[in-house]
Image: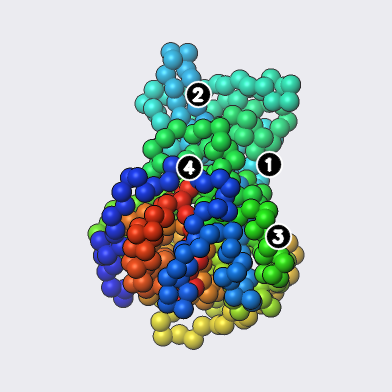
Amino acid sequence: MLSPIHIEDYSYDLPEERIAKYPVDPRDSSKLLLFKDNEISKSKFKTIGDHLPESAHLVFNNTKVIPARLFFQKETGAVIEIFLLNPVSYGGEITRNMEASDSTVWHCMIGNKKRWKDHSLNYQLQIDDQLIHVTAELIDREQNHVRLSWNGNLTFAKVVTAFGKIPLPPYLNRDTEERDLQDYQTVYSEKEGAVAAPTAGLHFTDSVFNDLRKKHIDLSYITLHVGAGTFQPVKAENALDHDMHSEQVVFQKSFIDHLITNHETVIPVGTTSMRSLESLYWFGVKLIKEENQVFQIPKLYPYQWENEKLPDLTESFMAIAKYMEASSLDFLTGATEIFIFPGYTFRVCKGIITNFHQPKSTLLMLISALIGDKWKDVYAFAMQNDFRFLSYGDSSLLLP
Protein backbone atom coordinates (compact mmCIF):
# COMPACT_ATOMS: atom_id res chain seq x y z
CA MET A 1 0.00 0.00 0.00
CA LEU A 2 1.52 3.30 -1.10
CA SER A 3 1.57 6.12 1.43
CA PRO A 4 -0.08 9.39 0.41
CA ILE A 5 2.17 11.89 -1.38
CA HIS A 6 1.47 15.49 -0.40
CA ILE A 7 1.79 17.66 -3.49
CA GLU A 8 2.53 20.68 -1.29
CA ASP A 9 5.94 19.08 -0.63
CA TYR A 10 6.81 19.73 -4.27
CA SER A 11 6.11 23.42 -4.43
CA TYR A 12 8.39 26.44 -4.67
CA ASP A 13 7.95 30.12 -5.47
CA LEU A 14 8.33 30.78 -9.21
CA PRO A 15 7.98 34.50 -10.04
CA GLU A 16 6.52 35.25 -13.46
CA GLU A 17 9.68 37.09 -14.51
CA ARG A 18 11.76 33.92 -14.09
CA ILE A 19 9.76 32.07 -16.75
CA ALA A 20 11.63 32.34 -20.06
CA LYS A 21 9.31 33.67 -22.75
CA TYR A 22 11.86 33.07 -25.53
CA PRO A 23 14.98 30.92 -25.85
CA VAL A 24 18.50 32.33 -25.86
CA ASP A 25 20.35 32.58 -29.17
CA PRO A 26 22.37 30.55 -29.94
CA ARG A 27 20.67 27.63 -28.19
CA ASP A 28 23.83 26.24 -26.63
CA SER A 29 24.65 29.55 -24.89
CA SER A 30 22.03 28.74 -22.25
CA LYS A 31 23.17 28.18 -18.69
CA LEU A 32 23.87 24.67 -17.40
CA LEU A 33 23.44 23.72 -13.75
CA LEU A 34 25.58 20.76 -12.66
CA PHE A 35 24.60 18.43 -9.85
CA LYS A 36 27.45 15.95 -9.60
CA ASP A 37 29.08 14.17 -6.67
CA ASN A 38 26.51 15.90 -4.46
CA GLU A 39 27.91 19.30 -5.43
CA ILE A 40 26.12 22.08 -7.34
CA SER A 41 27.89 24.35 -9.82
CA LYS A 42 27.19 26.17 -13.07
CA SER A 43 28.54 26.33 -16.60
CA LYS A 44 27.35 26.90 -20.18
CA PHE A 45 25.40 24.24 -22.03
CA LYS A 46 27.91 24.13 -24.89
CA THR A 47 30.39 22.55 -22.44
CA ILE A 48 28.10 19.66 -21.51
CA GLY A 49 30.40 17.12 -23.13
CA ASP A 50 33.09 18.02 -20.56
CA HIS A 51 30.82 17.01 -17.68
CA LEU A 52 29.46 13.68 -18.86
CA PRO A 53 30.91 10.34 -17.73
CA GLU A 54 33.18 8.80 -20.39
CA SER A 55 30.84 5.85 -20.72
CA ALA A 56 27.71 8.00 -21.06
CA HIS A 57 25.00 6.78 -23.42
CA LEU A 58 22.71 9.74 -24.18
CA VAL A 59 19.18 8.90 -25.30
CA PHE A 60 17.21 11.58 -27.17
CA ASN A 61 13.49 11.84 -27.94
CA ASN A 62 13.22 12.59 -31.67
CA THR A 63 9.51 13.43 -31.70
CA LYS A 64 8.49 16.47 -33.71
CA VAL A 65 5.87 18.98 -32.60
CA ILE A 66 2.96 19.35 -35.00
CA PRO A 67 1.02 22.62 -35.38
CA ALA A 68 -1.86 21.06 -33.48
CA ARG A 69 -4.04 24.16 -33.10
CA LEU A 70 -6.46 24.43 -36.02
CA PHE A 71 -8.75 27.43 -36.42
CA PHE A 72 -11.96 27.34 -38.48
CA GLN A 73 -14.14 30.40 -39.03
CA LYS A 74 -17.86 29.94 -39.55
CA GLU A 75 -19.90 32.07 -41.93
CA THR A 76 -21.29 33.85 -38.88
CA GLY A 77 -17.75 34.94 -37.97
CA ALA A 78 -17.47 32.65 -34.96
CA VAL A 79 -14.05 30.97 -34.66
CA ILE A 80 -13.82 27.32 -33.58
CA GLU A 81 -10.45 26.06 -32.35
CA ILE A 82 -9.65 22.37 -32.70
CA PHE A 83 -6.65 21.27 -30.62
CA LEU A 84 -5.44 17.83 -31.71
CA LEU A 85 -4.70 15.58 -28.73
CA ASN A 86 -4.59 11.91 -29.71
CA PRO A 87 -5.51 10.09 -32.93
CA VAL A 88 -8.41 7.65 -32.87
CA SER A 89 -8.28 6.16 -36.37
CA TYR A 90 -5.76 3.48 -37.43
CA GLY A 91 -5.80 2.01 -33.94
CA GLY A 92 -4.55 5.30 -32.49
CA GLU A 93 -1.10 4.86 -34.03
CA ILE A 94 0.30 8.36 -34.49
CA THR A 95 2.64 7.60 -37.39
CA ARG A 96 -0.11 6.05 -39.52
CA ASN A 97 -2.41 9.01 -38.85
CA MET A 98 0.29 11.50 -39.78
CA GLU A 99 0.85 9.58 -43.03
CA ALA A 100 -2.89 9.38 -43.87
CA SER A 101 -3.63 10.86 -47.30
CA ASP A 102 -7.35 11.69 -47.20
CA SER A 103 -8.82 11.63 -43.67
CA THR A 104 -8.03 11.04 -40.01
CA VAL A 105 -9.98 11.06 -36.73
CA TRP A 106 -8.62 12.69 -33.56
CA HIS A 107 -9.68 13.19 -29.97
CA CYS A 108 -9.52 16.96 -29.51
CA MET A 109 -10.05 19.89 -27.21
CA ILE A 110 -12.56 22.19 -28.85
CA GLY A 111 -12.69 25.90 -28.21
CA ASN A 112 -16.09 27.62 -28.63
CA LYS A 113 -17.68 24.17 -28.98
CA LYS A 114 -21.18 25.45 -28.17
CA ARG A 115 -21.09 27.43 -31.43
CA TRP A 116 -20.32 24.27 -33.43
CA LYS A 117 -23.56 22.51 -34.23
CA ASP A 118 -23.88 19.43 -36.41
CA HIS A 119 -22.66 20.87 -39.71
CA SER A 120 -19.07 20.59 -40.90
CA LEU A 121 -16.42 23.31 -40.82
CA ASN A 122 -14.34 24.19 -43.87
CA TYR A 123 -10.99 25.80 -44.61
CA GLN A 124 -9.13 26.51 -47.87
CA LEU A 125 -5.39 26.89 -48.35
CA GLN A 126 -2.69 26.61 -51.01
CA ILE A 127 -0.08 23.84 -50.76
CA ASP A 128 2.40 23.37 -53.61
CA ASP A 129 0.13 25.21 -56.06
CA GLN A 130 -2.81 23.00 -55.10
CA LEU A 131 -6.03 24.40 -53.67
CA ILE A 132 -6.70 22.23 -50.62
CA HIS A 133 -10.12 22.01 -48.98
CA VAL A 134 -10.03 20.84 -45.35
CA THR A 135 -13.28 19.68 -43.73
CA ALA A 136 -13.84 19.07 -40.01
CA GLU A 137 -16.78 16.99 -38.76
CA LEU A 138 -17.67 16.52 -35.09
CA ILE A 139 -18.54 12.83 -35.28
CA ASP A 140 -18.75 12.24 -31.51
CA ARG A 141 -19.74 15.32 -29.53
CA GLU A 142 -19.41 13.64 -26.14
CA GLN A 143 -15.91 12.27 -26.80
CA ASN A 144 -14.79 15.29 -28.86
CA HIS A 145 -13.87 13.07 -31.81
CA VAL A 146 -13.28 15.07 -34.98
CA ARG A 147 -12.84 13.70 -38.49
CA LEU A 148 -10.59 15.82 -40.67
CA SER A 149 -10.61 15.18 -44.42
CA TRP A 150 -8.92 16.87 -47.38
CA ASN A 151 -8.24 16.54 -51.08
CA GLY A 152 -4.93 16.49 -52.98
CA ASN A 153 -3.50 13.13 -51.87
CA LEU A 154 -1.23 14.90 -49.35
CA THR A 155 -0.20 13.45 -46.00
CA PHE A 156 -1.90 14.80 -42.91
CA ALA A 157 1.54 15.88 -41.68
CA LYS A 158 1.89 18.18 -44.68
CA VAL A 159 -1.65 19.53 -44.40
CA VAL A 160 -1.50 20.27 -40.68
CA THR A 161 1.96 21.86 -41.01
CA ALA A 162 0.59 24.30 -43.58
CA PHE A 163 -2.66 24.90 -41.72
CA GLY A 164 -2.08 24.83 -37.95
CA LYS A 165 -0.29 26.78 -35.27
CA ILE A 166 2.35 25.50 -32.85
CA PRO A 167 0.75 24.95 -29.39
CA LEU A 168 3.01 26.78 -26.96
CA PRO A 169 2.87 25.88 -23.26
CA PRO A 170 0.06 27.82 -21.55
CA TYR A 171 2.42 29.28 -18.93
CA LEU A 172 4.22 31.35 -21.59
CA ASN A 173 1.12 33.57 -21.72
CA ARG A 174 1.74 34.76 -25.27
CA ASP A 175 0.61 34.02 -28.82
CA THR A 176 2.60 31.79 -31.13
CA GLU A 177 5.03 33.72 -33.33
CA GLU A 178 6.75 32.81 -36.59
CA ARG A 179 10.05 32.11 -34.81
CA ASP A 180 8.39 29.44 -32.63
CA LEU A 181 8.11 27.19 -35.68
CA GLN A 182 11.86 26.64 -35.34
CA ASP A 183 12.53 27.60 -31.73
CA TYR A 184 10.05 25.03 -30.38
CA GLN A 185 11.64 22.09 -32.23
CA THR A 186 14.84 20.25 -31.40
CA VAL A 187 17.43 20.24 -34.19
CA TYR A 188 17.05 16.45 -34.35
CA SER A 189 13.22 16.34 -34.41
CA GLU A 190 12.03 13.81 -36.97
CA LYS A 191 8.86 11.88 -36.10
CA GLU A 192 5.74 14.08 -36.29
CA GLY A 193 3.12 13.62 -33.61
CA ALA A 194 3.87 15.60 -30.43
CA VAL A 195 1.82 18.56 -29.22
CA ALA A 196 4.61 19.68 -26.89
CA ALA A 197 8.38 19.70 -27.37
CA PRO A 198 10.84 17.54 -25.41
CA THR A 199 12.35 20.81 -24.21
CA ALA A 200 15.55 19.44 -22.62
CA GLY A 201 16.72 18.85 -26.19
CA LEU A 202 16.21 22.45 -27.31
CA HIS A 203 19.73 23.36 -26.12
CA PHE A 204 21.53 20.97 -28.47
CA THR A 205 23.17 22.33 -31.62
CA ASP A 206 25.23 20.80 -34.42
CA SER A 207 28.30 22.16 -32.65
CA VAL A 208 27.40 20.37 -29.40
CA PHE A 209 26.75 17.12 -31.28
CA ASN A 210 30.14 17.39 -33.02
CA ASP A 211 31.82 17.84 -29.64
CA LEU A 212 29.99 14.81 -28.19
CA ARG A 213 31.05 12.65 -31.14
CA LYS A 214 34.68 13.74 -30.76
CA LYS A 215 34.45 12.61 -27.13
CA HIS A 216 32.96 9.28 -28.30
CA ILE A 217 29.76 9.80 -26.32
CA ASP A 218 27.18 7.20 -27.34
CA LEU A 219 24.07 8.82 -28.91
CA SER A 220 20.73 7.06 -29.46
CA TYR A 221 17.19 8.07 -30.38
CA ILE A 222 13.75 6.90 -29.30
CA THR A 223 10.30 8.44 -29.80
CA LEU A 224 7.72 9.52 -27.24
CA HIS A 225 5.00 11.73 -28.67
CA VAL A 226 4.55 14.29 -25.91
CA GLY A 227 0.91 15.02 -25.07
CA ALA A 228 -0.80 18.10 -23.66
CA GLY A 229 -1.14 16.27 -20.34
CA THR A 230 2.51 17.04 -19.62
CA PHE A 231 1.38 20.58 -18.66
CA GLN A 232 -1.45 19.42 -16.42
CA PRO A 233 -0.75 20.54 -12.85
CA VAL A 234 -1.37 18.15 -9.99
CA LYS A 235 -4.53 19.43 -8.30
CA ALA A 236 -5.12 16.49 -5.98
CA GLU A 237 -3.82 16.95 -2.44
CA ASN A 238 -2.59 13.36 -2.59
CA ALA A 239 -0.58 13.21 -5.82
CA LEU A 240 -1.35 9.51 -6.17
CA ASP A 241 -4.91 10.54 -7.12
CA HIS A 242 -3.63 12.50 -10.13
CA ASP A 243 -4.78 11.14 -13.49
CA MET A 244 -1.59 10.47 -15.43
CA HIS A 245 -1.78 11.02 -19.16
CA SER A 246 -0.94 8.22 -21.57
CA GLU A 247 1.69 8.86 -24.25
CA GLN A 248 2.73 6.79 -27.24
CA VAL A 249 6.30 5.43 -27.41
CA VAL A 250 8.18 3.91 -30.33
CA PHE A 251 11.47 1.97 -30.17
CA GLN A 252 13.49 0.68 -33.11
CA LYS A 253 14.72 -2.92 -32.95
CA SER A 254 18.26 -1.65 -33.59
CA PHE A 255 18.00 0.52 -30.46
CA ILE A 256 16.92 -2.44 -28.32
CA ASP A 257 19.87 -4.49 -29.60
CA HIS A 258 22.26 -1.61 -28.90
CA LEU A 259 20.84 -1.08 -25.42
CA ILE A 260 21.49 -4.69 -24.45
CA THR A 261 25.25 -4.07 -24.60
CA ASN A 262 25.28 -0.33 -23.78
CA HIS A 263 23.14 0.20 -20.71
CA GLU A 264 25.69 0.86 -17.98
CA THR A 265 25.50 4.67 -18.01
CA VAL A 266 22.28 5.62 -19.75
CA ILE A 267 21.49 9.32 -19.38
CA PRO A 268 18.19 10.43 -20.94
CA VAL A 269 17.83 13.87 -22.49
CA GLY A 270 14.60 15.00 -20.87
CA THR A 271 11.87 13.53 -18.73
CA THR A 272 10.12 12.09 -21.80
CA SER A 273 13.18 9.99 -22.66
CA MET A 274 13.44 8.92 -19.02
CA ARG A 275 9.80 7.84 -18.85
CA SER A 276 10.21 5.97 -22.14
CA LEU A 277 13.31 4.07 -21.03
CA GLU A 278 11.94 3.10 -17.65
CA SER A 279 8.69 1.99 -19.32
CA LEU A 280 10.68 -0.16 -21.74
CA TYR A 281 12.22 -2.06 -18.82
CA TRP A 282 8.75 -2.71 -17.36
CA PHE A 283 7.49 -4.04 -20.69
CA GLY A 284 10.30 -6.58 -20.52
CA VAL A 285 9.09 -7.50 -17.03
CA LYS A 286 5.57 -8.04 -18.38
CA LEU A 287 6.91 -10.36 -21.06
CA ILE A 288 9.04 -12.35 -18.59
CA LYS A 289 6.20 -12.62 -16.08
CA GLU A 290 4.01 -13.83 -18.96
CA GLU A 291 1.26 -11.37 -18.06
CA ASN A 292 0.54 -10.37 -21.65
CA GLN A 293 2.27 -8.98 -24.71
CA VAL A 294 0.54 -5.60 -24.71
CA PHE A 295 2.96 -2.67 -24.30
CA GLN A 296 0.80 -0.60 -21.97
CA ILE A 297 2.33 0.52 -18.67
CA PRO A 298 -0.27 1.71 -16.11
CA LYS A 299 0.75 4.60 -13.88
CA LEU A 300 1.49 2.55 -10.74
CA TYR A 301 2.65 -0.68 -12.38
CA PRO A 302 6.27 -0.46 -11.08
CA TYR A 303 5.18 -0.23 -7.44
CA GLN A 304 3.54 -3.65 -7.15
CA TRP A 305 6.70 -5.77 -7.09
CA GLU A 306 8.08 -4.87 -3.66
CA ASN A 307 8.63 -8.45 -2.48
CA GLU A 308 9.37 -10.13 -5.80
CA LYS A 309 12.64 -10.77 -7.59
CA LEU A 310 12.77 -8.77 -10.80
CA PRO A 311 14.84 -9.37 -13.93
CA ASP A 312 17.98 -7.31 -14.48
CA LEU A 313 18.31 -4.94 -17.43
CA THR A 314 19.89 -7.45 -19.77
CA GLU A 315 17.17 -10.03 -19.08
CA SER A 316 14.43 -7.47 -19.65
CA PHE A 317 15.87 -6.11 -22.89
CA MET A 318 16.69 -9.60 -24.17
CA ALA A 319 13.06 -10.62 -23.59
CA ILE A 320 11.93 -7.64 -25.67
CA ALA A 321 14.41 -8.42 -28.46
CA LYS A 322 13.25 -12.04 -28.51
CA TYR A 323 9.61 -10.94 -28.64
CA MET A 324 10.33 -8.57 -31.55
CA GLU A 325 12.23 -11.23 -33.46
CA ALA A 326 9.45 -13.77 -32.97
CA SER A 327 6.91 -11.20 -34.15
CA SER A 328 9.10 -9.96 -37.05
CA LEU A 329 8.95 -6.40 -35.69
CA ASP A 330 11.41 -3.72 -36.82
CA PHE A 331 9.93 -1.29 -34.32
CA LEU A 332 7.92 -1.54 -31.14
CA THR A 333 4.96 0.75 -30.40
CA GLY A 334 3.45 1.06 -26.94
CA ALA A 335 1.87 3.46 -24.48
CA THR A 336 2.83 4.51 -20.99
CA GLU A 337 1.20 6.25 -18.05
CA ILE A 338 4.18 5.57 -15.78
CA PHE A 339 4.22 7.84 -12.72
CA ILE A 340 7.73 8.29 -11.33
CA PHE A 341 7.81 9.78 -7.84
CA PRO A 342 9.98 9.47 -4.69
CA GLY A 343 10.25 5.82 -3.76
CA TYR A 344 10.69 4.71 -7.37
CA THR A 345 13.77 2.58 -8.08
CA PHE A 346 15.35 3.59 -11.38
CA ARG A 347 16.08 0.56 -13.52
CA VAL A 348 17.70 2.11 -16.58
CA CYS A 349 18.63 5.77 -16.07
CA LYS A 350 21.72 6.91 -14.18
CA GLY A 351 21.05 10.65 -14.45
CA ILE A 352 19.23 13.16 -16.61
CA ILE A 353 19.63 16.30 -18.71
CA THR A 354 16.56 18.42 -18.07
CA ASN A 355 15.14 21.93 -17.75
CA PHE A 356 13.56 23.40 -14.61
CA HIS A 357 9.97 22.35 -14.05
CA GLN A 358 6.77 23.86 -12.73
CA PRO A 359 5.91 23.73 -9.02
CA LYS A 360 3.51 20.93 -8.04
CA SER A 361 4.15 19.03 -11.28
CA THR A 362 4.69 15.34 -11.95
CA LEU A 363 7.97 16.29 -13.63
CA LEU A 364 9.30 17.91 -10.45
CA MET A 365 8.30 14.77 -8.57
CA LEU A 366 10.30 12.73 -11.09
CA ILE A 367 13.37 14.89 -10.37
CA SER A 368 12.84 14.35 -6.65
CA ALA A 369 12.68 10.61 -7.26
CA LEU A 370 16.13 10.84 -8.86
CA ILE A 371 18.00 13.18 -6.48
CA GLY A 372 15.79 13.22 -3.38
CA ASP A 373 15.30 16.40 -1.38
CA LYS A 374 18.43 17.82 -3.04
CA TRP A 375 16.02 19.15 -5.67
CA LYS A 376 15.31 21.99 -3.25
CA ASP A 377 18.99 22.96 -3.16
CA VAL A 378 19.25 22.67 -6.94
CA TYR A 379 16.26 24.94 -7.51
CA ALA A 380 17.40 27.41 -4.86
CA PHE A 381 20.81 27.60 -6.56
CA ALA A 382 19.09 28.17 -9.92
CA MET A 383 17.03 31.01 -8.45
CA GLN A 384 20.05 32.63 -6.79
CA ASN A 385 22.08 32.45 -10.01
CA ASP A 386 19.47 33.88 -12.37
CA PHE A 387 18.68 30.70 -14.25
CA ARG A 388 15.70 30.88 -16.61
CA PHE A 389 12.85 28.43 -15.97
CA LEU A 390 10.51 26.10 -17.89
CA SER A 391 10.34 25.21 -21.59
CA TYR A 392 12.47 28.00 -23.08
CA GLY A 393 14.65 28.22 -19.98
CA ASP A 394 18.08 26.93 -19.00
CA SER A 395 19.23 23.36 -18.46
CA SER A 396 20.68 21.06 -15.82
CA LEU A 397 22.73 17.87 -15.74
CA LEU A 398 21.76 15.80 -12.70
CA LEU A 399 24.03 12.89 -11.80
CA PRO A 400 23.07 11.44 -8.39
| Residue at screen point 58% across, 54% down | 28
Lower position in the chain sequence, tag 2 or tag 3: 2
Q: CA distance from mark 2 to mark 3?
A: 44 Å
Q: Is residue 127 above or below residue 53?
A: above
Identify which amino acid the numbered label 3 is placed on: Asn
In percent of width and height, residue 42 lies at 47, 64
**The quarter of the displayed image where residue 379 is located:** bottom left
Q: Secondary structure at mark 2?
A: strand
Which numbered dot is residue 210?
A: 3
Question: What quarter of the picture does the N terminus occupy?
Answer: bottom left
Circles 3 and 1 in contact, beta carbons < 8 Å: no
Residue occupied by mark 4: 22
x, y (%) of residue 262? Answer: 66, 76
Work out whether mark 1 precedes mark 4 in sequence or the reverse, and give the earlier one. 4
Q: Give the label, 3 or 1, closer to the camera.
A: 3
Q: Earlier in the sequence, mark 1 or mark 2?
A: 2
Along the line of sight, the residue nearer the viewer: 88 or 176: 176
Instruction: Where is residue 102? Give x, y as percent.
Output: 67, 32
Disc 1 to disc 4, C-alpha distance? 31 Å
Q: Which residue is mark 2?
A: 72
| Residue kind at label 2, given as amino acid type | Phe
